[in-house]
Image: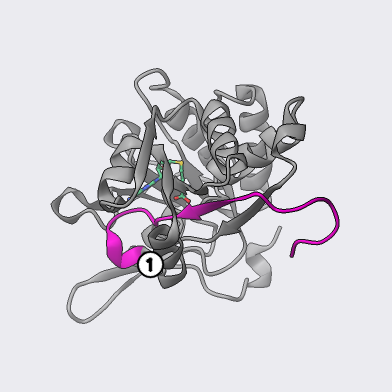
Amino acid sequence: MSGGGGPVVGRLSVVGVGPAGPEWITPEVAARLEAATDLVGYGPYLERIAGPHHRVHASDNREELARAMHALDMAAEGRDVVVVSGGDPGVFAMAAAIFEALEGAQAQRWAGVEVDVTPGVSAMQAAAARLGAPLGNDFCVISLSDNLKPWSLIQRRVRLAAEADFAMAFYNPISRARPWQLGEALGIVREAQGPDTLVMLATAVGRGEREDVQISTLGEVDPTMANMSTLVIVGAASTRVLERPSGRRHVYTPRYVESAESR
Ligand code: SAH
């Protein structure tokens, strides 16, 4: 979708490598990685995917804007750069950081860089699939990290989403610097939706033995069981547990909403 403007001098793709191993990398992303000369991203992701022909530019997980600018500079030199995000690159990840840089004061020097985004499997999709279909009806997605937005806004979004009876997926639920936010967010939902509301902690989904998926309720959940690799799903009023004859439990949200449930 290029058109207008000057000549293209380099290329930058932002790709998502999914939340775990290579089986959740799409063929389109794999082809894009294969063609690249340079990979940019968080070190542990790059280790999983770099080949011998790649120049690897690993960086810390927090310096997204600096990483975006560095990637654009290499593309402007004519290199074929792929910026790697976990999950989907558009969900709390590098794609938005690239566009922030392209709107910044230094954007002119990247005028000839063609930018595109290639989707990946996001953690909420992997976690939901493990559970069954908890996001089978309307849901909303909130990052609980207050690094880039005020906590008061997160509180308001969680409260209004709970009042509107959305199922919810919480990314970045907890970290060493932010040990209390998840408990507070779940408390807000509990106030609106009640203690029997289902809540699921899906940790390290797809990462072998580290994977752990818990089904609980807002009345019983222990938020300290979550860590930085946990995706939290809070059910809507209609979200339920289906126990199969084998004993296996699935969580799902039906596609319909009973009129008694819609307030
Ligand atoms: N772009 C990523 C999200 C980056 S934010 C995506 O689309 O998935 C990082 C957060 O993603 C983590 O704090 C956690 O909430 C979630 N996450 C990433 N990988 C995960 C996994 N394998 N299992 C559970 N949650 C995961």
Between residues 63 and 261, which one lies in front from this camera angle?
A: 63
Q: Residue 43, image x and y in percent?
A: 32, 36
Element type where label 1 sits in the image:
helix
Q: Is 172 drawn above or below residue 211 in the view shown?
A: above
Answer few, some or many: residues within 10 Å of disc 1's Cα (few below 14, many 20 plus, some between 14 and 19). some
Residue 196 at least partly seen: no
Residue at screen point 33% across, 44% down: 45
Residue farthest to the bottom? 245
Residue at screen point 68% across, 62% down: 262
Task: Kindly identify which residue carries mark 1.
Answer: 129
Q: Residue 98, image x and y in percent?
A: 62, 40
In the rendered view of the protein, which quadrant contains the N terminus?
Answer: bottom right
Magenta span includes 247: no
> Picture quarter containing residue 223?
top left
Which region of the structure is painted magenta? 1-24
Between residues 229 and 43, which one lies in front from this camera angle?
A: 43
